[in-house]
Amino acid sequence: MLPQEIIRRKRDGDSLTEDEIVAIVEGIESGSVSDSQLAAFAMAVYFKGMTSRECVCLTLAMRDSGLVLDWSELDAPRIDKHSTGGVGDNVSLILAPTIAACGAYVPMISGRGLGHTGGTLDKLDSIPGYVSQPSDDLFRKTVGETGTAIIGQTAQLAPADRRFYAVRDVTATVESIPLITASILSKKLASGLDALVLDVKTGNGAFMKSHADSQDLAASLAEIANAAGLRTAALITDMNEPLASAAGNAVEILNAVEFLTGKRRDARLDEVTLALSSELLLLGGLAGNIDEAMGKIEAALSSGRAAEVFDKMVAALGGPVDFIERAGTYLEIAPIVRPVPAPRSGIVEAVDTRAVGIAVVELGGGRAAESDPVDHAVGFTELAPIGRAIGHAEAPLALVHARTEAAADRAAASILTAYKIGDQPIEPASPVLERIGPDASSQL
């Protein structure tokens, strides 16, 4: 089949056949479809969209462009979660070991920071020795022995997606919902999962800023995943302020350790993590109702089993064997840590969450270009949530962790600009806004 004829049909709004979609994906992998043709195809899809059937075909074809993991030797469900990205979103670091402590296996393929959003792999790379890109054998061994492994996408999983995404990234077609859906789900389907929960962010710190756009993406992801045979639900969660009180790499690892050990559980982070975790236990058939799911999750956390799983995973992937116990001594601390005083007393009324994320990147905690190194020590802690009463001196908006005084000055100025202070009390709203997907309480 000629790529240009397939492109022409999609450009004209026709529905492509499965064979045509497979031909495009095979051409991506073989190189017989050029970058210019792939860009034209992406732009045609961006403007004309895809039917659900087309999107399922594209997702499965990209899944089948590489290795599809087989976990049939494991005796419990293989389940996972995916977030569309946010600021202070370290849920994966907590959820994966907690779900594993509840009896499931969590082979989690995660990514690096993108734009203003943090990446789970960048956070884990702040742990000395941690191998975030292990061999397939080590990945499988770690999942089998500890219950979970959080790693990066390997070259064998959905390789067509990597080239397709690179073209989309430079042709202003990243925002296409069918292409986002196929990109996310092709990798999750290649991971050999039984169930998946999706955390679709909405708000000023999310890629999908409007609730309507987030609903469209969540509905597409849930519909296509279930149609492709992966039992999936999506939660729409609020990203109009950082999820945790920390934003950065090492600082978010320490925040997750404090959560797992019970030292500190930020309220919004707690609610979102428990909501996603309970969905997974229900979708995976490990709990019969929401109360049972919540009970198992709380028991895994309060007993220390979740923290133990995290510790074992870190050690198995090359990190310290006593990381949980001594996280503060292993993680690099920025040489400058200082408060950002509020300009006046009042109530935190709003936060420009994207601006907070950009401030982390400007400190060195993210990448302005793909080749940029990441400074794992920098970021923010003690980020004040919406609704908190603050004072000029005694209750700062945040603590900035910086490499130089000049960088700390710039970061502090960014925080002052990002925060809006009012005078009226604000009742904190639930960060879990909506659920989309099948009845989670029915068994697999």
Image: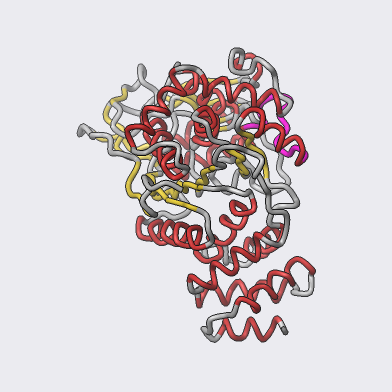
- Rendered view: 29 above or below 282: below
Q: Is residue 296 visible?
A: yes
Q: How many marks?
A: 0
Based on the displayed image, in which of its 4 quarters is residue 5 positioned? Answer: bottom right
- Rendered view: 34 above or below 219: below
**Residue in view at x 54 percent, y 86 percent:** 12
Based on the displayed image, in which of its 4 quarters is residue 129 positioned? Answer: top right
- Rendered view: 321 above or below 287: above
- Residue 405 magenta-drawn? no
Based on the displayed image, in which of its 4 quarters is residue 418 positioned? Answer: top left
Residue 360 position, x and y percent, is 55, 36
Residue 399 position, x and y percent, is 48, 24
**Residue in view at x 51 percent, y 44 percent:** 81
**Residue in view at x 74 percent, y 26 percent:** 318
- Rendered view: 241 above or below 222: above
The magenta span reads 124-135
Residue 336 position, x and y percent, is 59, 20
Q: Is residue 211 left or right of residue 152?
A: left
Q: Main secondary structure of the magenta part?
A: loop
- Residue 130 magenta-drawn? yes
**Residue in view at x 66 percent, y 40 percent:** 73
In this rendered view, identify the residue nearer to me: 292 or 32.
292
